[in-house]
Image: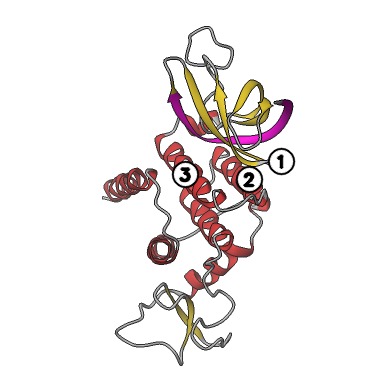
C-alpha cells in the first residue's frame, strides 16, 4: 500500500470490530473508497473526533486500490458544526450524503463532490435547507441519467406555451399536450424555478426566496419523479419526511 493524501468527505460510517470504524469517503482523486479507521472509538484515539460522516477534509491514507484503505490522519476543512447542532439541518445533510452515496456508486464523477460541498456550505451558512436540497436533487438527476425535460415539452419537444410539469410524462408539458383531469396544474414560478435549479451554480447563490406553494409543488414533483425513474432508496428519507411534517406543524402554530 502507498501513502496518499486525498481531499474528500465521509458519506457514511459503520462500526467495525470492538473499537474501529469503516468510513465510506468520496474523494476527488479516487471516487468512493472504503477506509478503515483503526481504534478510532477508543477515548484516547486522535482519530475519534474526525472518524464520522459529514467531515470534509484532506485524508491521509495507506491507500489500497480495490480494497480497504487505512486512515493515518486528517486535516479538517469543514466539520459543519452549526449543521450538526441543528436537527433540521443535520437531517437534510444526512439525506444529501445518502443520496450522494447512491449516485456515486454508479461512477466516479468528482463534479458530484464539488456540488455536494457547495450545498453543505450554504446549509452551514443558514440558507433555506429545503430549497438547497431541491436544487441538489435536480442536479443529481442529471448524474443519474434521468434528468426530466426542462427545455421543452417532454411529449412533443415544443419550447413554447409550457403550462405545467408532469412526473408521469417526464418533464415540462405544453398546452397542446396537456390533458385536463390527468395532468396536475402547477404555478408558472414552479416551472421557472425547476429549470433554474438545474442551471444555477450553488456556490454563487447569495439569497433564496421560494414561496410555500412553489416549494410544495417542487417537493411533490421531485418525490414522484425520484420514485418513478431512479430506484434510489435512502434510509434517511423517512426521517426527512418526519422533519418536514414537524416544520409544517410549527409554522401553522405560529400563524395561528
Q: Are marks 2 and 3 in contact (CB under 8 Å)?
A: no
Q: Earlier in the sequence, mark 1 or mark 3?
A: 1
Label 1 and label 3: CA atoms lie apart by 20 Å
Q: From the viewer's perspective, is residue 127 above or below residue 83?
A: below
Q: Which is more foreground, mark 1 or mark 3?
A: 1
Inspect this view and state whether residue 128 appears: no
Residue beneath the point at 54% across and 45% down: 127
The prevailing secondary structure element of the residues shown in magenta is strand
Label 1 and label 2: CA atoms lie apart by 11 Å
Q: Is residue 120 left or right of residue 249?
A: right
- The quarter of the picture where residue 113 lies is top right
- The quarter of the picture where residue 136 lies is bottom right
Residue beneath the point at 44% across and 74% down: 187
Tag 2 residue: 113
Inspect this view and state whether residue 32 appears: yes
Q: Which one is in front, 104 or 122?
A: 104
Instruction: Tell me the element at label 1.
Output: loop
Residue beneath the point at 45% across and 29% down: 14
Tag 3 residue: 98
Q: Position of residue 169 (x, y in %)?
A: 43, 78
Q: From the viewer's perspective, is residue 198 above or below residue 168?
A: above
Q: From the viewer's perspective, is residue 157 above or below residue 114?
A: below
Tag 1 residue: 29
Q: For the magenta stretch, what is the residue range?
A: 2-15
Based on the picture, tell me whether residue 12 belongs to the magenta stretch.
Answer: yes
Q: Position of residue 2 (x, y in %)?
A: 73, 26
Q: Is residue 140 left or right of residue 212?
A: right
Q: Which one is in front, 145 or 68?
A: 68
Amino acid at each position: 500500500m502507498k501513502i496518499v493524501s486525498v481531499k474528500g468527505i465521509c458519506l457514511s460510517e459503520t462500526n467495525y470490530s470492538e473499537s474501529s470504524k469503516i468510513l465510506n469517503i468520496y474523494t476527488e482523486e479516487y471516487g468512493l473508497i472504503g477506509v478503515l479507521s483503526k481504534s478510532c472509538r477508543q477515548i484516547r484515539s486522535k482519530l475519534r473526533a474526525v472518524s464520522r460522516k459529514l467531515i470534509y477534509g484532506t485524508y491521509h491514507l495507506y491507500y489500497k486500490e480495490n480494497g480497504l484503505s487505512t486512515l493515518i490522519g486528517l486535516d479538517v476543512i469543514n466539520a459543519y458544526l452549526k449543521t450538526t447542532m441543528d436537527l433540521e439541518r443535520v437531517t437534510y445533510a444526512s439525506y444529501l450524503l445518502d443520496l450522494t452515496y447512491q449516485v456515486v456508486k454508479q461512477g466516479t464523477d468528482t463534479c458530484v463532490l464539488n456540488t455536494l460541498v457547495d450545498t453543505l456550505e450554504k446549509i452551514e451558512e443558514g440558507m433555506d435547507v429545503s430549497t438547497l436540497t431541491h436544487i441538489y436533487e435536480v442536479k443529481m438527476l442529471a448524474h443519474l441519467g434521468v434528468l426530466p425535460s426542462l427545455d421543452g415539452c417532454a411529449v412533443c419537444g415544443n419550447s413554447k406555451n409550457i403550462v405545467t410539469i408532469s412526473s408521469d410524462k417526464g418533464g415540462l408539458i405544453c398546452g397542446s399536450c396537456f390533458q385536463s383531469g390527468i395532468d396536475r396544474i402547477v404555478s408558472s414560478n414552479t416551472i421557472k424555478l425547476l429549470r433554474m435549479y438545474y442551471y444555477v451554480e450553488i456556490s454563487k447563490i447569495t439569497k433564496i426566496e421560494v414561496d410555500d406553494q412553489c416549494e410544495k409543488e417542487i417537493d411533490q414533483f421531485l418525490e414522484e419523479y425520484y420514485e418513478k425513474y431512479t430506484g434510489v432508496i435512502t434510509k434517511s428519507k423517512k426521517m426527512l419526511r418526519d422533519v418536514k411534517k414537524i416544520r409544517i406543524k410549527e409554522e401553522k402554530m405560529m400563524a395561528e
